[in-house]
Amino acid sequence: MTEAQALDRARASFDRKAWAESYRFFQAAERDAALEPEDLERLATAAYLTGRDEESEIYRTRAHQLFLERSDGEAAARAACWLGFELLQRGARAPASGWFARAERILADAQLDCVVSGYLLIPAAIQRIVQGDPAAGDVAFARAADIARRFGDRDLASVACGGRGRALIRLGQIVEGVALFDEAMVAVIAGDVTPISAGDVYCTVLEGCQEIFDVRRSYEWTTLLARWCSTQPDLVRYRGECLIYRAEVMQFGGHWTEAARDAHDACDVLMSRPAAGAAFYRVGELHRLRGEFADAEAAYTRANERGRKPQPGLSLLRLAQGQIDAAAASIRSVLADTQVRIARTRILPAAVEILLAAGDLDHARRAAEELSEIAGAFGTPFLSAAAAQATGAVLIADGDIAAASASLRDACEIWRDLGMPYEEAQSCRLMAAVCERRGDPEGHRLELDAARTLLERLSVAPCVAAVDPRGARAPQQTPGSLSERELQVLRLLAAGNTNRAIAEELFISEKTVARHVSNIFDKVGVSSRTGATAWAFQQNLISTGDQSSG
């Protein structure tokens, strides 16, 4: 094959988005003669999209130098700018900053007015949003959008549109922000945007949808992202991110086996990149929900090592392990450190659950009220259901059973409409507690049956065991299998007492209480205090009055 033939095939493969083939033919052409800078840029893009980061950097740097030798300042600045973006994706902030500065200097020295100046606004705009100044981020993205319109650059227009959407969501302008997401995605779906920009827009939009728990949009755009990736079999870049988004969508839909597979695959694909932290966190969440606590702990640790704080999952893990005081201290710390309103939406539901378990009704109530306020502002069904469930749990603890029932019924309906079986089951379990407080054993049984049926879809024994002692891990499930001391601990536990309070009541150490709690879980076959409480009710070991006294 001649150099000209190899070059023709490389360019044709590039246009067809056959990235590995294009990469191969460009390399073959380069063995015979030096490539022009435009072809070096194509080769760099093919290398980047197939996961060859270092080679992409080398080829784009060479293109940059050749553009300088040609005195093409705009093209040289463009290459420098894209080098900066690629390095940022790898977490190499200092070199990225250097390339951005070089691009700015080239434009300034040549007094060039071109579209590259719009791209150079993007890093600072993102930084403003991350640092908690979305208004400044919106201004920068709006300037970039103006430059995109002036020069007719569709890539920059779509990137700026998605970026503005993120900024407006952080500013509480949810409807406007989501509308910009949809506008950005229309350009991507229509094929108006080049692959790297398209992948970045997909990630921006999906991260924004996850921030506000827009489950339906997340599902729709994740499905389209997966389809987009599948049309480019050689594509490595963005595949890991796609797997993370899909894992969360699958988890919410109750497809935990598929979610676990996608999350583990994402860890493998993203192992050396910053996004690996999010992948390991999703793995940890699935292990925690399955009752695989040691595996969850290991995954959370790896997430933390890669820059993703493992919260609120780690606090919920401590709660499931019976370490209520540790869980409460941890979640209080997370709440204190999380000031950005939109970020608190992921913390508040867990905070309500943990603080109620710790007997801290006042702070649980405040967390539920804050969650309700945010849900009202955002208007997404997920947050509305989460707020209704949290409010219902607080109202039960407050003794306002009628209001709790109404709130929990709303939560159940929304979860059911969203197709989220695990979350619906949690609301059903709380409704069972409402029925118990009302002295309605039939209603109590029906709600537990509903929760059990939902959880059985997940095929995870610990979840079922939490509401159904018949699905427990141990063969002995009668009150007689517990020692007298364990029965005392169980009654106090079911009354909502913390390990410390139980220790003080029984004049024993917290360590001893923790051992008794662990033994109780093993003997009755549950994995949480809620499950032990439900079992105690079913065995008539405690009464409504006993529980309310805690």
Image (tube, helix red, strand yellow):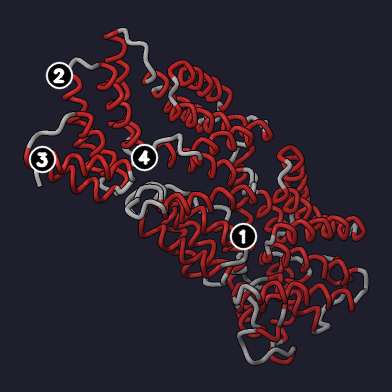
Query: Can I make out residue 512 in this image?
Result: no
Marks 3/2: CA–CA distance: 23 Å
Are discs 4 and 1 less than 8 Å apart at CB? no
Q: Nearer the viewer, mark 1 or mark 3?
A: 3
Residue 244 spot, x, y in % from top left: 48, 54
Are discs 1 and 3 less than 8 Å apart at CB? no
Label 2 crowd bin: few (<14), some (14–19), many (20+), radius 10 Å: few
Q: Secondary structure at mark 4?
A: helix
Q: Residue at x 36, y 40 (%)?
A: 89
Marks 2/4: CA–CA distance: 28 Å
Are discs 4 and 3 less than 8 Å apart at CB? no
Residue tagged 4 = 89
In the image, is residue 57 above or below residue 351? above
Residue 26 spot, x, y in % from top left: 18, 42
Q: Secondary structure at mark 2?
A: helix
Q: Residue at x 69, y 81 (%)?
A: 486
Marks 4/1: CA–CA distance: 28 Å
The part of the image, by quadrant, that contains residue 13 is top left
Query: Residue 3, labelled with which disc?
Result: 3
State which quarter of the image contains the C terminus: bottom right
Residue tagged 2 = 69
Residue tagged 1 = 252
Q: Nearer the viewer, mark 2 or mark 4?
A: 2
Q: Secondary structure at mark 1?
A: helix
Are discs 1 and 2 less than 8 Å apart at CB? no
